[in-house]
Amino acid sequence: MSTDTARLEAFSDGVFAIAITLLILEIKVPTAGGGVLTTQLLRQWPSYFSFVASFAFIGIMWINHHRLFTHIRRCDDLLLIFNLLLLLGITFVPFPTAVLAAHLGGPDQRTAAVLFQATYLLISLLFNLLWRYAASSRRRLLSPDTDASSVRRITRQYSFGPLLYLICLALVRVNVLASLLVNFSLACFFAIPAGRNRAVK
């Protein structure tokens, strides 16, 4: 049975808000008597990295989710399930980011980077699944105002995600820092509206 997307969007926004707010809990307050405060604060740089990276990535995912639902005006049971799977991936993001921050530069940094990149590969697949299901013409879940060219642009932009995140995952074996830089570049790419990427073929 189809319904409008108001409750789905409200629930999703709540999940995004909670996930992004809880990130600050990874940063611990230095204890009194535990040493020089400045030293304790500087020692926590991996936690700062984890917080900023997770905040930025989850924020960009929220922006993309919001953009998709300016076009998706109806939903059915399967779309609800796909949206829940996407939210599951998003709420998981702080964990691999914290693991990466804790092990970056150490002997286990490659394993941590694999977990990190695999998480984003999965999320990119789930974004594609959600959008392609909604955009399927026979389901009529999109707004009547959404033109075919907009659907093609969004589909084209999203289709690059899984392949590029798979490249990031493969790059981990060669150079962890390079794989993370490509991942960051992808986040910037997906922050740009699909209409701005018409030059991408």
Image (cartoon, grey):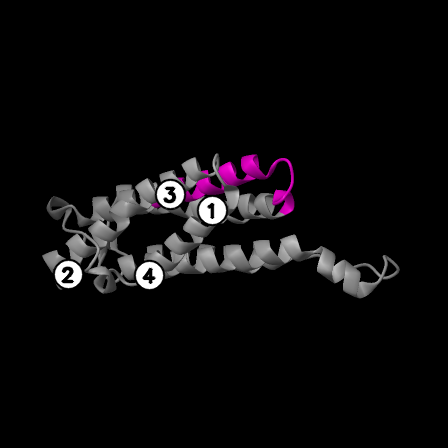
Q: Which residue is mark 4?
A: 66
Queried whether the magenta region covers residue 115, the answer comes back as: yes
Q: Is residue 144 left or right of residue 27?
A: left
Q: CA distance from mark 2 to mark 1?
A: 38 Å
- Residue 184 drawn at (x, y percent): 44, 54
Mark 1 / mark 4, whichever is N-terminal: 4
Q: CA distance from mark 4 to mark 3?
A: 22 Å
Residue 178 image label: 1
* Callout 1 crowding tier (Cα within 10 Å): few <14, some 14–19, many ≥20: few
Q: Secondary structure at mark 3?
A: helix
Q: CA distance from mark 3 to mark 2?
A: 28 Å
Q: Amino acid at mark 2?
A: Thr
Q: Residue furthest front?
A: 174
Q: CA distance from mark 1 to mark 4?
A: 30 Å
The residue segment tinted magenta is 102-124
Q: Which residue is mark 2?
A: 146
Queried whether the magenta region covers residue 134, the answer comes back as: no
Mark 4 / mark 3, whichever is N-terminal: 4
Residue 121 visible to the viewer? yes
Mark 1 / mark 3, whichever is N-terminal: 3
Residue 165 image label: 3
